[in-house]
Amino acid sequence: MAKLNAKDFIEALKEMNILEIKALIDAMKEEFGIDPTAVAAGPAVAAAEEAVDEGPKEVNIMLMDSGESKVKVIKVIRELTGLGLIEAKKLVDSAPVAVKEKVKENEAKEIADKLVEAGAKVELK
């Protein structure tokens, strides 16, 4: 039997339908006692685990003070949270208070920038 190189093997896979590929994987499991899908996923799983460890953290966005332009801050709070006017005003009046909790760090920075632009003082914790 002729030995297949990687390129020929991949070309042969392109010709197969999903059921034929499944049968091939099952035959490889039986013949060699390994799961080829697990071998291929190993490096990807390790990379994904590293990404989770180094990934964005979840933070709370704390409104510390509304600043001089309280109305602008209330408008931004309404936009970000979906609160009504009265609820947003109460939230701004009760500063320091969490505006949003457990938000990914990059999203939290965007939200904080909007609030700061409106005149608020914000902290990410």
Image (cartoon, helix red, strand yellow):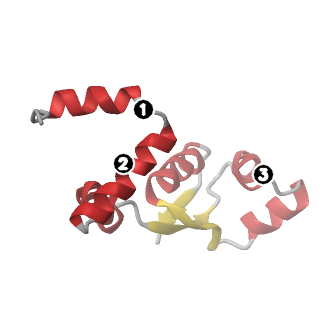
Identified by mark 3, the residue type is Arg
Residue 82 vertical position relative to residue 45 in the rendered view, above or below: above
Residue 125 placement (x, y as % from top left): 46, 72
Residue annotated with mark 2: 24
Residue 107 vertical position relative to residue 54 in the rendered view, above or below: above
Residue 51 vertical position relative to residue 20 in the rendered view, above or below: below
Q: Which label lies toward us, 3 or 2?
A: 2
Residue toward you, 123 or 10: 10
Quarter of the image with the N terminus is top left
Secondary element at tag 2: helix
Residue 108 placement (x, y as % from top left): 51, 56
Q: Going 66% across and 71% down the picture, which residue do you hit?
A: 95
Residue toward you, 73 or 36: 36
Mark seen at residue 100: none
Badge 2 crowding class, 10 Å Cα cut-off, few under 14, some 14 to 19, many 20 or more, is some
Going from the N terminus, do you reach mark 1 or mark 2 first? 1
Residue 62 placement (x, y as % from top left): 57, 68
Identified by mark 2, the residue type is Leu
Residue toward you, 30 or 115: 30
Give left or right: position of 97 versus 40: right
Asked whether the beta carbons under mark 1 and mark 2 sit within 8 Å of each other, the answer is yes
Residue 90 placement (x, y as % from top left): 82, 68
Identified by mark 1, the residue type is Met
Q: Toward which corner of the image does residue 46 lie, by quadrant?
A: bottom left
Residue annotated with mark 1: 16
Residue 113 seen in the current view: yes
Residue annotated with mark 3: 78
Going from the N terminus, do you reach mark 1 or mark 3 first? 1
Residue 54 seen in the current view: no
